[in-house]
Image: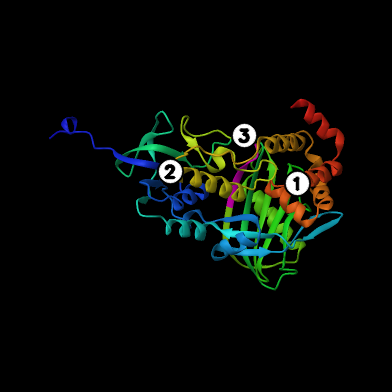
Amino acid sequence: MSSLNKPAAASIDLDIAIIGGGSAGITLASKLNNLSAVVIEPRTPTERDCSWALWADSSQTTQFSSVTKGSWQQWKLVDQDGEVVHNSNQYRYTSLSSAKYLTACENNLANGVELIRAAAEDIVAAPNDGGSFTAAGKHYSAAHIYDSRPPVIAADSLKQHFLGWEIRTKSPITDPEIATLMDFRVDQSRGLHFIYALPFSDRRLLVESTMISTRLEDKDWYRQAIGDWLKLQNIEIEETLAEEAGVIPMATVSRRDNGIACIGAASGAVRLSSGYAFTGIQAQVNKLAQGISTGDYHVPAPIPSALISMDKIFNRVLVAQPELGVGVMMGTAKALSADGFARFMLGSATWKDWATVILAMPKVPFLKQVFKS
């Protein structure tokens, strides 16, 4: 029989399809029960391994213990004039292995939820959040589709971009119990630039060169910054264990397919002023999974609109006057307590936290951006 005369392949009907098996997608899939569902993801967890970070409270410290690479009760920010060291009793700055987390979720899928290691193609949206697509040579039709793929980031938008090395050092490093969130003693000529360093032990270190700007740099530029910082710290590399790089949106993003509901970063779950997303994604997906269990398939907003507006003002100041960035970051760290700083970065700051930060900021640049909004 010729291909022209072959009957069309039957469509596989599903309750839910999740396109993209990253943080949001695979987390949601792992929470589904008593439903027919697929999660479509072409890459393995090992192929996408990187470090995810959050400020974990005691329950999260326990929840994510099996996938934790490092956890610190103390963290610091540093500039040419000194440093701010925070010591929290409520939160631990925590670095997770994405590969271990994704693998754990994949291994926890309920009966009826299938992982398909392929890309979704020919996606067509249908009314009421459903649609159809093909994957691995099969055609699927789902009553509800959630898109968890990375968002489209405009080339000229503000973004946080980085390249990092995980290294083994020749000698023990100083203060392995303190995470360095931002060390600004690096080149500031191209935007807000800092080194991020997490000591997983006294001889194992993740060190990243991170920029907040609209323009990406050549990879060797970040590598040079890392090398220069390591020399400043008198740290010698015995072995480079891994290299990772990434781009995090700090502006409104675009979805890949109109008409398909987005979750995770593509739905706006990235905190625009800091780039942190894991905690927001967890909260969004937990609410969505609870809703699905009661027949509500609506995607919850990951971040309150008021917080988004505040973050946009902050980012407009960075774009208009990038030279203020170091002072703003250091001023925020100095003004807040350790727990207040963690709450602020998590997006759960109290009104007292906000008032403290606002009083510590340079007033005129922020007021200019407020009146432009």
Circle 3/circle 1 CB separation < 8 Å = no
- Can residue 36 be seen here? yes
Q: Nearer the viewer, residue 294 or 269?
A: 294
Identify the residue at the far left of this view: 1
Q: Which quarter of the rendering shows the N terminus?
A: top left
Amino acid beneath label 1: Thr
> Above or below — where is 41 with respect to 106?
above
From the viewer's perspective, tell me whether residue 139 is left or right of residue 296: left
Q: Secondary structure at mark 1?
A: loop
* Disc 2 packing (10 Å; few <14; some 14–19; many ≥20): many
Mark 3 and mark 2: span between their CA atoms? 22 Å
- Can residue 241 be seen here? no
Q: Mark 3 or mark 2: which is in front?
A: 2
Q: Mark 3 or mark 1: which is in front?
A: 1
Q: Secondary structure at mark 2?
A: strand
Mark 1 and mark 2: span between their CA atoms? 34 Å
Q: Secondary structure at mark 3?
A: loop
Magenta span contains residue 250: yes
Where does label 3 land, which residue? 252
Where does label 2 land, which residue? 18
Amino acid beneath label 2: Ile
Q: Which residue is drawn at the image coordinates 81% and 44% (left, top)?
A: 357
Tell me which segment is drawn in magenta: 245-251
Where does label 1 land, which residue? 350
Circle 3/circle 2 CB separation < 8 Å = no
From the viewer's perspective, tell me whether residue 186 is left or right of residue 201: right
Q: Which residue is drawn at the image coordinates 43% and 58% (left, top)?
A: 108
